[in-house]
Image: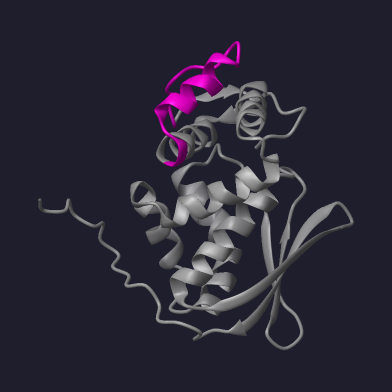
Amino acid sequence: MFVGGEVIVHGVVNKALERFTIDTYGFGLWQKVVSACPHAVAFYEAMLCYPDQDSYALLNQLSRILNKPNADILEDMGTYLVVHRNQDGVRRLLRFGGVDFRDFLFSLNEFNARIDLIMPDLNLPQINVVCGAKNQISIRLAPSWSEFTFLCIGILHAMADDYGALIRLAHFADTGSAVIQITLVDDRFAVAQGFKLAARGPSNG
């Protein structure tokens, strides 16, 4: 994702950052970000590939303008991908993985294969979900995109809310991989959000 040494980045990454910025902070702020990056463009094509320095520059400039750490921005972006109406397809893809939050977590073991069917060039870090002590589940992420951890944390918090689960999260490094440790405090803490596989239609009025 935003890792040095990679030559290209799938356009869906830059597109997601573009949409997150515009939907959250407005087009004017996105224009400021783009204008501060020499090789950036105003609108990215999701199915093209771009030099990785473009992704670095966009994220770093957004961090500078907002005076917010990259990790916090990526966590907010992960939340956005689940909760914002413009990203409803992402939420539906994730909710399709299980009837409750625990099922959803273990469905992430097949997430790489599902994404490869849709976008084989995205090359997400390998995800491995392991059951630990009582009510503890760990997600191990291969060390190819270090910042992917923070995006996942935002997604996990948002999905827990969507399922009505109360969780605690911690993350740490272990032999080069990132580990997110989830404690499932109460899997029925609140009423889950409604879910239909079909996309929501346009609202009337």
Q: Position of residue 56 (x, y in %)?
A: 67, 28
Q: Is residue 158 left or right of residue 67?
A: left
Inspect the magenta stretch and tell me whether residue 103 lies in it. no
**Residue 173 x, y percent position in the rendering:** 84, 57
Give the tally of numbered discs: 0
Q: Residue at x 32, y 70 (%)?
A: 195
* Position of residue 196 in the picture relative to residue 184 (left or right): left
Question: Residue at 60% of width from left, 11% of height from top?
Answer: 38
Residue 39 visible to the viewer:
yes
The answer to whether 194 appears left or right of 155 in the picture is left
Q: Where is the N terminus found, in terms of image quarters?
A: top right
Quarter assignment of residue 137: bottom right
Can you give x and y, in whole percent of width and height, for residue 97 in the image? 46, 68
- The vertical placement of 79 against 21, above or below, is below
- Residue reaching furthest to the top: 38
Q: Is residue 44 visible?
A: no
Q: Residue 55 location, x and y as percent?
A: 62, 28
The image quarter containing residue 199 is bottom left
- Residue at horizontal 46%, vertical 37%? 25
* Residue at 17% from the left image edge and 51% from the top image edge: 202
> Is 151 positioned to the left or the right of 88 in the image?
right
Question: According to the image, what is the colour scheme of the structure?
Answer: one colour
Q: Which residues are magenta?
A: 24-46
Q: Is residue 28 magenta?
A: yes
Residue 64 vs 69, above or below: the answer is above
